[in-house]
Image: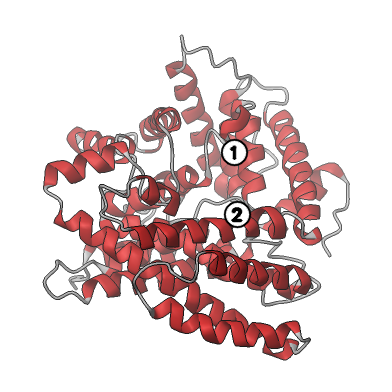
């Protein structure tokens, strides 16, 4: 029986049916996703991905409302959204930072050398095998892979590093597969020579990811007992709005909602905390009301560009974050009100990240715990994997995944050879690649289980 589903619908379904996607339900978004004692309603990487999909779809529908334009593909929006965090580590960004330092050493102020978006690409191309037996990867389209990789920005140095690692994995995981060399060349070009996602849908998902974090994560902080911090954040929302004179973009959707937001906020401040859920809903409507018109205009401007200008822009500039849109205001035809709107969003986002999120005890404590978990376990696994052998010893690993980790190890050897003359100076690099792929796939609870089984130490989760 034939399958007449569209290609991007295939992509979406293969992501949904993958094991890595199911594991997102047990990975941290803001606070630990497992062992919580305060609330069962905290967001996880899975629910976050669904929220990104909803916001991105709303933006696409807004653009599609203009009947004169080429319709954006909602299947592609869904596939990229659901797959964008599929390779994310447990315990949020602290996991990817520690793993990056473990494999490649300190990277100074520039952050991780390799981020979760590249691990998501590896997961979709090599580490998952849901598509069919003995086929490595989910066999996704280039457009979906491109959107997944570029939902987070990679500078030129990091793209170069990721390209070399990716090629090493291709040589091992796709060995013997009949893949047209021209297709591999095209894949490398699209993935690593363009800074921005190549599709409008990919750009929308990247920005929707940023919007989703600002819209929804604040609710989790309140549920963890951080009501005072949440009130402080909403106070900043009002303060920054008043500073702008309430004169942001020409769109009136946000302004209409803001009036209701202020009324409910005053009630909440007067200790009528039973209305906090209503306040949170109004805040989300207010934020999305600011963001959607701006993103829609950016996409329409891109669609109106000639092919050469668009290609040059996507190759040289990143359009997946609001701060990048502001820097490209003349090329994207953004007016003064829209720039003020972006600056407003940046201010409340910075306040949230620096004054609210980082000072929440539940988050601060788990950042410390997770850092120690990853540091100790990665070193322990590295030591065990190379114990009494010149290759790799995987006796402690479940037999079902040993072959995959052997491939990761061999990909590390390929990459190590490609580094000759580059002066990487990284010890045990092939084994560290195997540790990398093993740890990055773990959930919050499984990494604790593995840590306790290898160290005889107990981790207090509550």
- The image shows residue 142 at horizontal and vertical percentages of 27, 49
Q: Is residue 134 above or below residue 226?
A: above
- Circles 2, 1 touching at the beta carbon (< 8 Å): no
* Marks 2 and 1, the one that precedes in the sequence: 2
User: Residue at (75%, 57%) from the top-left corner?
Assistant: 363
Q: Quadrant of residue 201?
A: bottom left
Q: Quadrant of residue 234?
A: bottom right
Query: What number is the disc on residue 436?
Result: 1
Secondary structure of residue under mark 1: helix
User: Residue at (80%, 43%) from the top-left corner?
Assistant: 454
Q: Nearer the viewer, residue 263 or 207?
A: 263
The residue carrying mark 2 is 350
Residue 49 located left or right of residue 69 = right
Q: Is residue 121 above or below residue 203?
A: above
- The image shows residue 255 at horizontal and vertical percentages of 45, 78
Quick one: quadrant of the N terminus? bottom left
Secondary structure of residue under mark 2: helix
- The image shows residue 284 at horizontal and vertical percentages of 52, 76
Q: Quadrant of residue 316?
A: top left
Quick one: quadrant of the C terminus? bottom right
Q: Nearer the viewer, residue 144 or 7?
A: 144
Measure how far apart labels 2 and 1 are at the Cα level.
31 Å
Q: Nearer the viewer, residue 104 or 445?
A: 104
User: Residue at (46%, 9%) from the top-left corner?
Assistant: 421
Q: Nearer the viewer, residue 407 or 234?
A: 234
**Residue 255 visible in the displayed image:** yes
**Residue 130 visible in the displayed image:** no
* Mark closer to the observer (2, 1): 2
- The image shows residue 373 at horizontal and vertical percentages of 76, 45
């Amino acid at each position: 029986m034939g399958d007449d589903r569209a290609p991007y619908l295939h992509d979406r379904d293969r992501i949904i049916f993958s094991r890595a996607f199911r594991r997102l339900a047990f990975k941290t978004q803001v606070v630990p996703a497992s062992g919580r004692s305060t609330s069962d309603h905290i967001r996880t990487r899975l629910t976050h991905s669904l929220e990104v999909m909803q916001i991105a779809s709303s933006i696409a529908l807004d653009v599609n409302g203009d009947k004169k334009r080429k319709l954006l593909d909602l299947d592609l929006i869904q596939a990229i959204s659901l797959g964008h965090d599929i390779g994310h580590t447990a315990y949020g960004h602290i996991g990817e930072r520690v793993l990056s330092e473990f494999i490649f050493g300190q990277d100074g102020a520039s952050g991780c050398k390799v981020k979760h978006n590249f691990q998501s690409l590896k997961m979709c191309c090599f580490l998952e095998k849901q598509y069919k037996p003995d086929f490595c990867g989910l066999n996704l389209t280039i457009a979906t892979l491109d959107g997944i990789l570029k939902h987070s920005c990679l500078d030129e140095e990091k793209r170069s590093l990721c390209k070399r690692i990716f090629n090493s994995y291709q040589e091992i995981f796709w060995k013997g597969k009949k893949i047209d060399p021209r297709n591999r060349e095209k894949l490398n070009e699209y993935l690593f020579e363009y800074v921005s996602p190549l599709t409008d849908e990919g750009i929308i998902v990247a920005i929707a990811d940023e919007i989703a974090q600002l819209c929804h994560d604040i609710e989790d902080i309140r549920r963890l007992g951080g009501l005072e911090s949440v009130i402080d954040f909403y106070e900043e929302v009002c303060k920054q709005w008043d500073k702008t004179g309430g004169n942001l973009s020409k769109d009136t959707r946000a302004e209409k909602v803001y009036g209701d937001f202020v009324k409910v906020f005053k009630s909440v401040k007067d200790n009528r905390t039973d209305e906090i859920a209503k306040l949170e809903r109004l805040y989300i409507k207010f934020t999305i009301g600011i963001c959607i018109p701006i993103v829609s205009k950016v996409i329409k401007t891109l669609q109106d560009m000639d092919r050469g200008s668009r290609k040059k822009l996507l190759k040289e500039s990143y359009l997946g974050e609001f701060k990048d849109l502001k820097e490209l205001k003349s090329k994207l035809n953004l007016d003064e009100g829209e720039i003020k709107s972006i600056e407003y969003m940046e201010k409340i986002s910075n306040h949230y990240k620096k004054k609210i999120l980082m000072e929440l005890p539940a988050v601060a404590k788990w950042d410390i715990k997770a850092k120690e978990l990853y540091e100790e376990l990665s070193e322990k696994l590295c030591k065990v994997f190379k114990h009494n052998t010149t290759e790799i010893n995987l006796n402690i690993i479940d037999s079902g995944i040993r072959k995959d980790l052997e491939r990761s190890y061999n990909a590390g050897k390929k990459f190590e050879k490609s580094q000759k003359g580059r002066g990487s100076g990284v010890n045990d690099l092939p084994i560290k690649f195997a540790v990398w792929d093993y740890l990055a796939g773990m959930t919050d609870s499984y990494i604790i289980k593995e840590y306790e089984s290898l160290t005889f130490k107990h981790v207090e989760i509550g």
